[in-house]
């Protein structure tokens, strides 16, 4: 399988605090990688560096074998190929669900309106929200808003989808519908990197689980290797703490 993302010796600090420390990380085409770890371990910062929302201090990030130079390359064009779903939904409150999903293809890809609407309706059907296309976001539940956000990210035909704790702002009873949408995408072969505290999703959907602690990747492996046979003491302590 081809590598979609390859990260070498990535470092990132905010002031005196070094948040990422010599990160080596890759994602292959069609792979689902789930990043786990305690709050403050650097997971979300790593994800934001992959989408160039944060600029690394040192190291290399390559997409499909091409090293990205943040000073020379057009980052907005690169970001068009990387779908990102955040904790907060960031939907346009004055636009309907359909208009929210159509917005980026219309404005960025310059897609014809009829084609953009057709594509948006296909995606709303995919995330189970066909009946909500004319509804405004304030009439949706949190889980529905997040599924619209996923459809919106997919509308740009990304090469990879990044999920930054997409269920952390949701009420417990709404988490399942978002995770199911993500599982469906995984089954379809979408390349995905997800930062999440939902260990069941990591067990069921991930090809590979990465455990981070204190800005470093401490251990990685299949879900079975990480959850059933962790090798590193830090990993063992973390898993014991969440399963107590």
Image (cartoon, rainbow, N blue to C red):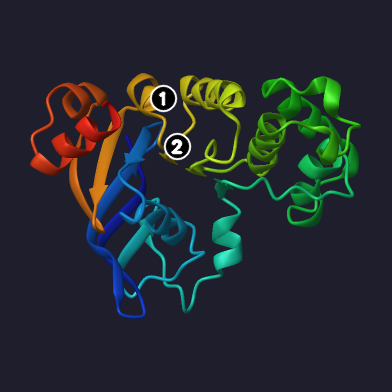
| Number of marks drawn | 2
Q: x%, y% of residue 199?
A: 36, 28
Position of 117 relative to 83 (above/below): above
User: Which residue does the image show at 80% across and 28% down from the upper left?
Assistant: 121
Closer to the camera, 11 or 230?
Answer: 230
- Looking at marks 1 and 2 on the same chain, the residue that comes earlier in the sequence is marked by 2
**Mark 2 falls on what kind of element?**
strand
Q: Residues within 10 Å of mark 1 (few under 14, many from 20)?
A: some
Closer to the camera, 49 or 106?
Answer: 49
Reading the image, the residue beneath label 1 is 201
Q: CA distance from mark 1 to mark 2?
A: 13 Å
Q: Nearer the viewer, mark 1 or mark 2?
A: 1
Q: x%, y% of residue 9?
A: 22, 64
Q: x%, y% of residue 45?
A: 40, 59
Please, which residue is most extreme toward the front here?
244
User: Which residue does the image show at 24% across and 57% down from the upper left?
Assistant: 214
The quadrant of the image that shows the N terminus is top left
Reading the image, the residue beneath label 2 is 192
The quadrant of the image that shows the C terminus is top left
């Amino acid at each position: 399988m081809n590598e979609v993302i390859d990260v070498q010796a990535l470092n990132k600090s905010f002031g005196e605090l070094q948040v990422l420390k010599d990160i080596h990380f890759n994602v292959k085409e069609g792979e689902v990688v789930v990043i786990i770890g305690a709050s403050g371990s650097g997971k979300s910062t790593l994800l934001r560096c992959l989408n160039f929302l944060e600029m690394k201090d040192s190291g290399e990030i390559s997409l499909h074998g091409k090293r990205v130079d943040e000073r020379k390359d057009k980052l907005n064009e690169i970001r068009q190929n990387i779908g990102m779903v955040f904790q907060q939904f960031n939907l346009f409150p004055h636009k309907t669900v359909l208009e929210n999903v159509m917005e980026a293809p219309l404005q960025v890809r310059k897609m014809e309106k009829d084609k953009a609407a057709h594509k948006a309706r296909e995606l709303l059907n995919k995330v189970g929200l066909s009946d909500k296309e004319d509804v405004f976001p304030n009439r949706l539940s949190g889980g529905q808003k997040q599924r619209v956000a996923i459809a919106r990210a997919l509308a740009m035909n990304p090469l990879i989808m990044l999920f930054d704790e997409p269920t952390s702002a949701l009420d417990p009873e709404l988490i399942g519908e978002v995770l199911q949408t993500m599982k469906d995408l995984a089954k379809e072969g979408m390349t995905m990197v997800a930062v999440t505290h939902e260990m069941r999703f990591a067990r069921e959907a991930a090809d590979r689980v990465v455990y981070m602690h204190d800005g470093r990747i401490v251990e990685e492996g299949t879900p079975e290797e990480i959850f059933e046979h962790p090798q590193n003491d830090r990993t063992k302590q973390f898993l014991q703490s969440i399963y107590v």
